[in-house]
Image: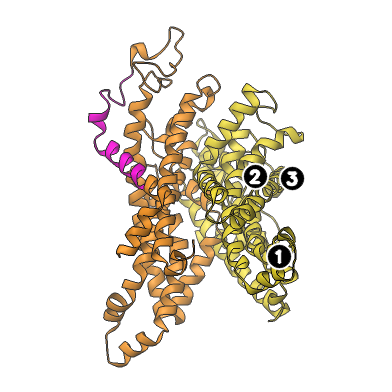
Amino acid sequence: MLSIILKRLGQSVFILLGVTLITFSLSFMMPADPVRMIAGRSATKATVESIRKELGLDKPLPIQYAKYVNRLVQLDLGRSYKQKTQVAELIKSRLPATLLLMAGAIFFEILIGIPAGILAATQRGKFWDNWIMAISFAGVSMPQFVLGLLLLYLFAYVFGWFPLGGYGTWRHLFLPALTLGISGGGWYSRMVRSSMVDVLCQDYIRTARAKGLSEFKTIMVHGLRNGILPIIAMIGLDVGIFMAGAVVVESVFGWPGIGQMAWQAIQMVDIPVIMGVTLVAAIGIIIGNLLADLVMPFVDPKMRVD
Amino acid sequence: MTDIVKYFLKNKLALLGLVSILVFSFSAILAPMITPYDPYMQFFEGLSLEGAPLPPNAKFWLGTDLLGRDLFTRLVYGARTSLIIGIAANGIALFIGAFLGIIAGYARGWTGAVIMRFTDLMMAFPALLLAIALAAIFQPSLWIVALVIACVNWVQIARVIYSQTMALATSEYIEAVRSIGASWPRILFVHILPHLWPTILVWGTLGIATTVLLEATLSFLGVGVRPPTPSWGGIIYESQSYFLDAPWLVFFPGLAIMALSLAFNLVGDALRDALDPMKRGRN
């Protein structure tokens, strides 16, 4: 087990290095010159050149990249061109909002997806199964911004139950988390259904029924334990995806998370922020996958054997 | 083959999806015959006296947008944008993904390892951020947006094709073909590729659903197809700040995006089941 984890960690380092290389190359393809953006329109040529020198942007690219990686190892993500603060500080200040939204979203995904999936699997081919699968498909086919705007219109504007966006109380969290939960919950329910359908065909389920166990206990205790396994990997993936911030939902609801920051940074060509967020997101995706790998053996004894 | 068609025809949702795709395609192709208006025409009577967009009415069936243009007309022409990008972007992604997947799965060794480590790397890269960054770099036109989406979407396909090719390449019948001296292009194109077609077909359909959503999202964030070209995501982007007063400007384009993406999802899902003999009997 330990050797597997160590091997995975080793691979992760290479993946991270690759991510830095891509973000670094992308940032130099940006059409706007960051120095010009900092200096402003009226700056003289001398000022522009001195800022360029100060930021180290006059050096050859490989040297700039080496310096960048060297600082990363010391957890220094550089300074934002626009906001004149450390990128690490900016990300740290945005992280709680993103993590909160992530927790809320995963809560709704589980709340919606797992019961719906179980119900569909036990009613295979019947009324509820058909409807749940159709609705789940509609959920995953709905763009998040449309769903978000519609929920906002209905529950915040027409009914006035929730605020029209922003951050602070659980009421602010409810709609953005629900938006992400509905689109993710669609995938969850489809996955739970297909894995439960497999499980419910197994011999041991027939045995459980034969020995007189109630249908509820058979499904919830014996079936669900195995049927739920793919969801754990899925939650691991979601942790990673939401680390990048839910760019769309955060921008619809004015949620001050990492995604919104990344979106603003791209518009202002604030390269250190873009690179920082991408890196944090990639680390999040790697950690999410690792977590799923680590949790699996505890839930599924079959995974404990190397 | 007839089994597959029969299975497909029995699935009502898939049929609904197929019909929707046909309706969208025909309205995209025949747009000028479906709507009498021009999608760029700003009607004087398309705005209220205060300059606000009009709700749905007899003249403008789905209402007008902030500039007094007919929403229905813009939606019909927007179907062109969505379908062109959906098919082009997904076609490119499918080509790149299948090509790299087949090479990696058949060659294995170093070539395979390098290709697959690269897909690992792309998997760790937040897809939407990458697409936004790419779209910000290249001033987006219809074709650039298609390319950007293809750059992001090929990864999954490559992994699926890779594992299938690898399983096929190590199977006994390929061993047999190789031992009678078949060249590698012959093995790849005559003996392996035909087995991959069902996968490619399924991903080709499901992928369009993802692509339609991604195009709409990019346009909604303002880095997709540039106005005034009608695009469903773009219409919502333009009217976002006004949507509490004019919800139809979000509702109808949103419905269109969902319907098109849903249609491709339904058809792709049914194709997957129909082409999988294991599943056909069970559901």
Which label sits in the foreground, 1 or 3? 1
Distance between the alpha carbons at the discs numbered 2 and 1: 35 Å
Could you tell me which residue is drawn at 46 percent across and 14 percent down?
B52
- Rendering coords of residue B99 (x, y %): 36, 68
Name which residue type carries label 2: Ile
Disc with the residue nearer the chain's start (2 vs 3): 3
- Rendering coords of residue A285 (x, y %): 62, 59
Contact between marks 2 and 1 (CB within 8 A): the answer is: no
Return the residue found at the far bottom. B179
Contact between marks 2 and 3 (CB within 8 A): the answer is: no
Disc with the residue nearer the chain's start (2 vs 1): 1
Tell me the magenta residue range: B18-42
| Residue tagged 1 | A225
Quarter occupied by residue B181: bottom left
User: Do the residues at pointers 1 and 3 share their chain?
Assistant: yes
Name which residue type carries label 3: Pro
> Which secondary structure lies at badge 2?
helix
| Residue tagged 2 | A258
Q: Is residue B22 above or below residue B201?
A: above
Chain drawn yellow in the picture = A
Q: Is residue B253 above or below residue A187?
A: above
Distance between the alpha carbons at the discs numbered 1 and 3: 32 Å
Which chain does the numbered disc 1 sit on? A
Distance between the alpha carbons at the discs numbered 2 and 3: 9 Å
Could you tell me which residue is drawn at 62 percent across and 63 percent down?
A230
| Residue tagged 3 | A96
Name which residue type carries label 1: Arg
**Residue A19 in view of the camera:** yes
